[in-house]
Amino acid sequence: MSSPITAAAAPAGTAAAAIHAIRTLALVGPAAAGKTSLAEALLVKAGAIGAPGSLERGTTVSDFDPLERKLQHSLNSTVMHLTHSDTRIHLIDTPGAADFIGQSLPALEAVETAAIVINAATGVEPMAVRMMQQAAARHLDRLIIVNKIDAPGVNLPGLLADIQAAFGKECLPLNLPSAGAARVVDCFYSKEGSADFSSVADAHRALVEQVVEVDGDFVERYLNDGDIDASELHAPLEEALRQGHLIPVCFVSARSGAGIKELLDVVVRLLPDPTEGNPPDFLRGEGEAAQPMHATPDPDLHVLAQVFKVTVDPYVGKMGVMRVHQGTVTKDSLLYVGDGRKPFKVGHLFMLQGKDHVEVERAVPGDICAVAKVDALHFDAVLHDAAEDDHIHLAPLDFPVPVHGLAIEPKRHGDEQRMWEILQKLVDEDPCLKVEHVPATNETIINGLGDLHLRILLDRLSEVHRFEVNTRPPKVAYRETITGKAEAQYRHKKQSGGAGQFGEVHLRVAPRERGAGFEFVDAVKGGTIPGQFMPAVEKGVREALAAGVIAGYPVVDVQVTVYDGKYHTVDSKEIAFVTAARKAVIAAIQEARPIVLEPIVDVEISAPEAATGDITGDLSSRRAQVAGTDAQLAGLMLVKAKAPLAELTGYQTRLNALTSGQGRFSLTLSHYEPVPPNVQAQLTSGHQLKDD
Ligand SMILES: Nc1nc2c(ncn2[C@@H]2O[C@H](COP(=O)(O)OP(=O)(O)O)[C@@H](O)[C@H]2O)c(=O)[nH]1
Ligand SMILES: [Mg+2]
């Protein structure tokens, strides 16, 4: 079946040649590896900016946000571009802290190559491992950049061995540090030169042998001739990168400038253009029925672009940053947002240089550009110019589920609506932030990935939006259930003036399996409650269960069987049966050995090995069951446990104290369990049923 997206549309143009002169690169990896500094060094070397800015003064192209300046940390991804050897390079700098992975992961949707930046001074860190895995899962070409080779006391040969141990033997240097890391020497095109360790000849041979392996003909030639000139290896090299059969390693110092020019050359000469990477996994259709679909990096086809970043500025409005995968976007383009029925006109098209916008005429496949003031834009939206094409989307990213909750309310009464609107904007910018209203506890909860994540959100509320809020730990979403069976009946009878109210309900309650939910059974025989009143009976039962009986939390996992009752031809009204059913079920539950259930979560704590004993000891005092510990890279230990969520209020503060701020943890809901008797006594004491 031919679709308008894949059928040729616009007349053939000349932009095709331009596509081969585009490269896209995301700088990912741990915080403080020097990604932002590296981006700045690359921009300066290529002449895109005059002089390097200063991280300390907040004048770098990336890290321009006032909060980034205050914290000296990237919090957002930043899009930049430069030109080197007539090739346009789109660069995305990303934050390294795990709490901001909602900003760094989407960068992988916009590029052919993920550059994992490793800090030579601290070695292979967990974030490098995580991003390496995520990039592999997206079938991206991968490049390792070892930064800070100038730093005192670094052991670069040891680090290279660690990199190969962590990511495989396919991690091979394209260049080697030389002259005491003052510069680097190429070992792909050349076979000689002197390096600080290893040898250029050995590194060259290792590279060529790895590259030819993807093509039998080249293997044969190599075996016959003993060498193949690097200039002939372009095609197999691209293939090796696509297959992950080669992960090149480059050495640089963003500070001294060593290896920066060489890195630009590598990007232009060896990294894939938009036609040479693995095509992104687009899907067409919904759910199970979705079919894989290929975007073709051809400027003359219909437009297919994907929004991987949204910013909502209080003054400029909503801006969507997109990667063009197919077709050509111009200021005159009419683009549909996903399944939307009304296209918007692009109007102004920008390329970004950090916070600065440069207006451009067109963007072709491989380009990263932005449109502003389009409210319908949202993270992950696919933009296209064929009205008939529906449900095109990229395979979703593997975002962690945010469960660090904080209850939030406006300082000023009556500002609830405005708070909700501002929160919605912040949530729009970060796929790992969620805001929800929890009816069970009547709270607005913001959920993020960690303490820092939420702290930044609150800073933004007050500093950017000038909105003051109160926060507190969210109430724990306890539940109630029963452990025995019971029966009860209730007659509701009221005589007021002329018409009366009459309804009588007899029912039984029985426990159901945990997680089985609520079941309502109508076992009335002989019309003692006429069928027309059964919905009212069920409504009364549901109302009572939702409001809770012994502690004010929803009652779950019960079966309620209504088996008898009485009615009155004149005075029976729906409202009478609602009330009778509510009172009957409350009475029955009170007799059925009711208990309170609490959420139990799976906790995973990553912390320095030395703190393991303190952490497990502390967990035990929180009624947790430690399930095990796993050694991780770089002296870290992963502790897994199951714990009552109620015991983890403010846990990050405690973990910080136990690990000098090094510990991180994540939570996921496991199941519900009865609370211990003393906790139950606490939760039920003073609870009063609402009477009417
Ligand atoms: N010695 C040395 N320090 C560097 C280098 N690159 C960055 N830094 C420093 O490392 C720290 C973190 O840099 P930054 O660019 O913010 O790292 P990011 O978190 O990965 O973006 C800053 O203090 C930089 O000055 C380098 O090549 N050598
Ligand atoms: Mg940074």
Image: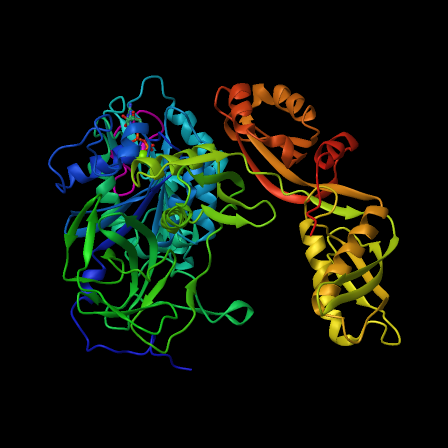
Q: Position of residue 493 (x, y in %)?
A: 79, 62
Q: Is residue 31 left or right of residue 444?
A: left
Residue at position x 57%, y 19% from top? 610
Q: Position of residue 300 (x, y in %)?
A: 23, 72
Does the magenta segment cover residue 59?
A: no
Image quarter for residue 280?
bottom left
Residue 97 in sight in this render: yes
Residue at position x 77%, y 60% from top? 580
Query: In this figure, what is the number of numbered marks?
Result: 0
Does the magenta segment cover residue 197?
A: yes
Q: Is residue 603 left or right of residue 241?
A: right
Q: Nearer the viewer, residue 672 or 3?
A: 672
Which image quadrant: the N terminus?
Answer: bottom left
Residue 229 in sight in this render: no
Residue at position x 27%, y 60% from top? 374
**Above or below, 589 relative to 249:** below
Query: What stretch of residues is rendered in magenta?
Result: 185-200
Q: Image quadrant of ligand 1?
A: top left
